[in-house]
Amino acid sequence: MSNAKERKHAKKMRNQPTNVTLSSGFVADSGVKHHNGGGKPFQCQKESHPGTSRQRQTRTTHRPPAESDAKEQPSSRVTFRKKGGWKAGPEGTSQEIPKYITASTFAQARAAEISAMLKAVTQKSSNSLVFQTLPRHMRRRAMSHNVKRLPRRLREIAQKEAEKAVHQKKEHSKNKCHKARRCHINRILEFNRRQKKNKWLETHIWHAKRFHMVKRWGYCLGERPTVKSHRACYRAMTSRCLLQDLSYYCCLELKGKEEEILKALSSMCSIDTGLTFAAVHYLSGKCQGSVMLYRANKYPLEMLGPVTFMWKAQGTPGDTAESRQLWIWLHPALKQDILEEVKAVCQCMEPTKATVWIPDPLLTPSQEKSQIDLPEEKIGKKRKRKDDGENAQPVKKVIGDGTRDPLQPYSWLSPSTGIMIRDLTMEMNRFRLIGPLSHSILTEALKAASVHTEGEDMEKTPHRWWIESCKNPDSVSLHRRQAAIFDLLGGITSPAEIPAGTILGLTVGDPRINLPQKRSKVLPNPEKCQDNEKVRQLLLEGVPVECSHSFLWNQDISKSVTENKISDQDLNRKRSELLVPGSQLFLGPHESKVPILLIQQPGKVTGDDQRGWGSGWDVLLPKGWGMAFWIPFIYRGARVGGLKETSVHSQYKRSPNVPDDFPDCPAGVLFAEEQAKHLLEKYKRRPPAKRPNYVKLGTLAPFYCPWEQLTRDWESRVQAQEEPPAASSPSGGESGPSRDGVPCVPGPGRTAQLSENQGTPLRASSEPEGVMETDCPAGVEPEGAGRQRATSSRLCVLSSSALLISTFEELPGMLLGEQEGLGSSPDIPPRKGPDQLPCRSSGDLDPGDWGPPA
C-alpha cells in the first residue's frame, strides 16, 4: 500500500479500537497456538503486487511471526497485525474464536468511546434546525411551525426543537430597537399627547385601521372606508343597518328654572321656523326637537345654525318642580358662535371653578415598596408587576378623557337668572343606527339590566346607585316598563313606524357579556309583536313620558359607571376560567349596569316615494363605553360609515347637511371658503392644457356658490319693481339697503321664482306685464345708473363685453385664478380688446350659469 493510501486508511480508522482484550484464562485454557489454515505458525500473508523489483523486495520482506509477538506481550492480550496497522478481523484471527466475552468488562473498556459517541450525537455541530438540513427540493413552506410538513423520521426532533425554543429564555440586550422600546411606553399617555390639537373619539383606533382619516373641526374623523363601499353603504341604509359614530357632536347643558331658560332662549329663535323650546310636545321630555338659532333679536338675519334639543322628563325621581335640565346638541362647527350667544342671553359670563383636576397618581402598597427599592435594583432590568390581590386599588393614569385643559372653564353660572351652563362635549358617546334593521340590532345586542332585589353588601359592589334604585318599588316598576317597550321594538320592521323624535330611557347590562363568537346577521322577530294592542299604542302615542327617564342625566351616576367599568382583560380572564369554554358568562351583581338613551331619528319626509327612508335610532352612552357597544353592534350585522356616508344620507333624505347646506351662517361661510381654496389648489395642480376654460364656458364662480351676490341681485330686482320709474336717478346708486358682509335671504313673498326649465324669472300674478322685460333691473333706469348697479354686483347678468371686462377686473383672484391659472391656458386668446373676449349675449346668460362648485 502506498504512503497516500496508508495515510488515508489511518485517518479513516483512527477512531477504531486497536486491540481486543480477552479474559485472562482464555489463552491458558486453549493451550494451542494460533495457526493458519496449513497448520504452520501464523505469518503475514504475502501479496504479489505489480511494480519494480525493489518494491516487490520491500513488500516481501520477512516479518517476525505473530507467535513471537504474542510472547512479548502479556498473556491476556492477543493481537493480530495486518497491512496498514494492528487490526482484528476475520483475516487475522485464528480458526478458533472465543467462546464467550464478559459483557461488563467489554463495555467498561469501551465506556469512553460510548460516551464520546453519545456526546457527539446529542451536540449539534451547526446552528441549523432540522428542517434546514433538508435538501431544497424537500423543503416546504411553514415547516418552521408545522411539524407535519416534515418527513416522519424528523418530526420528533423538530418537535423537541420547537419546545426547547419556547422554554428557552433569551437575554434582552440593553440597546433595544425602537419598536421594542415603544411597547413599554404608556400608550394612553402617548395617545393623549398626539390628540392635543385634534381630539380622538373612543373608536379612533378602530377607524384608523379601516378608514381614510381627516382632520375636521378639531377632531380626527373617519371620512370614508378604505374599501369600495358606496353601494354597500346605500344598501345598508335602505334594507339593513348603517352605523356611525357622532360622538364629535357637542352638547350644552342648561340647568335652572324653566321660565328663566325659556325667556333667555326665546330671543334666539322664532315660531316662524317651527316649534321652539317652549313647545308643549317637547317640554314634557318625551320627544326630541329641532330649531334654527339666530343671534339675539336678529331674526331673520344673522343665523347661527340648526340644533336639536331635549328636556329631561318631568316627574322623574330627584327633580323639583322648578329645576329643569335641557340638552342642546349641535355641530362642532357651530359651537363657538352658539355657546357665546347662549352665554350672553343667559347672562352666564362668570365661569365656575374648574372641575377637571390632575391629582398625583394613586399607588398600590406593592408599587410604593417597589419605588423605595428601586435604587437597589439593576438598571435596565425589566421589573415585573406585582399584584396585591383583590385589595389592590386601581391606578389612575388618565384623568377624564386626557384631552381637556384643566385650566379652561367648562361651566358658567349666572348670579341673576340662576342658570348654569355646562359644556358636556366628549362626556358622552353618540352612535347612530340607520336602516330598517336598527331595531333588531339594538334588541339583540342590548339586554335590560337584571334587578337585584336581594340584600347586597353596599361596600363590596361598585354599583351602589343601581342597588339603591332597586330598593325603590317605583324605580323597579319603571325599569320593567321600559324593558317591555324595548322588547316590543324587536318585532317592528322599520324605525319610521315610531313617532319622530321618540325618546326611550333604559338601563342595560354589559353588552360584552353576550357577545357572539362570530359575526352574524339579525332579522326582525315577529313573535315579539304578538300583543297587537301594545304595539298599536306604541305606534300611535309613542313612549310614555315617564319611560323617557334615564340615569344618564345624573352626572354623578355617569361618572361612577365610567370609573367602575370592568376592563377587557379581566373579562377575558373570567371567560378563560369557565368550566365549559364558550358558555355564557354570569357575573351576578358585579356586572356593570349602563344607563342609555334611545332617540328616534325621522327619515325622509318630502316626496311621494320612499317615505321614511333613512330613519333610525341614536344611542347616547356614558364616556368610556364606546368600544364596549361599538363591537357588539358590528357583530350583529351593522356596517360602519364615515363623513361621506353622512353627506350621502342627507342628500338622499332631502335634508340639509351641516355646515355644507347652510351658507348664510358663519360656519357655512367658513366651509365655503375652505372648499373654494381646496378646489382652486386642485385646479392649479393640473397642467394648463388640461384645465377647463371657465371663461369660454361662461362660469364666473367655478369654485364656490355666490349666494350673497345672488340674494342681493334678487333684492335689487324686487325693489326696482316696487319703486316708480320717476324715482330712479343716476345718483341713487343701489336702491336697496347695504348689507355688506352679511348674508341676506329675502322673504318668500318678495323673492322672484326661477323657472327650472328656462332659468328665467317668473312674474307674480299681481305684477303688471312688461316690468321684467330686460335682463337687468337697471333697464328702467338711465344707462349710467344701470352700469353702476351692474358693476356693484359682481355676478349680475352682463349685457356687453365691455362691462364683462370691467367685471372680470373686479373679481377676486379666487374666482378666475391668477395669470398662470385661467389665463395661461393655450385655449384662451390674449386680452387685446373687448371683441376678442369670449362672451355670450345677455339673453343667453342667467343665474343658472353661476353653477355649483365643480
Image (tube, rainbow, N blue to C red):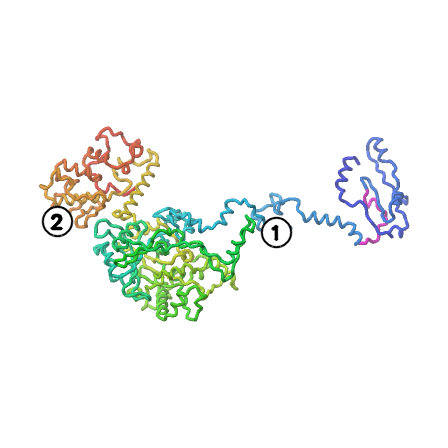
Is residue 97 covered in magenta? Answer: yes
Q: In this rendering, does residue 608 appear at all?
A: no
Q: Residues within 10 Å of mark 2 (few under 14, many from 20)?
A: few
Which structural element holds mark 1? helix
Which structural element holds mark 2? loop
Examine the image and state in which quarter residue 466 appears: bottom left
Q: Which residue is mark 2?
A: 766
Is residue 418 covered in magenta? Answer: no
Inspect the image, locate mark 2, and give the three-letter code of the amino acid beneath it: Ser
- Upstream in sequence: badge 1 or badge 2: 1
x 37%, y 61%: residue: 556
Looking at the rendering, the stretch of residues picked out in magenta corresponds to 86-102
x 84%, y 38%: residue: 47
The secondary structure that dominates the magenta segment is loop
- Whole-percent x, y for residue 157 in the image: 64, 51
Q: Which residue is mark 1?
A: 164
Classify residue 589 as left or right of residue 385.
Answer: left
Examine the image and state in which quarter residue 474 appears: bottom left
Inspect the image, locate mark 1, and give the three-letter code of the amino acid beneath it: Lys
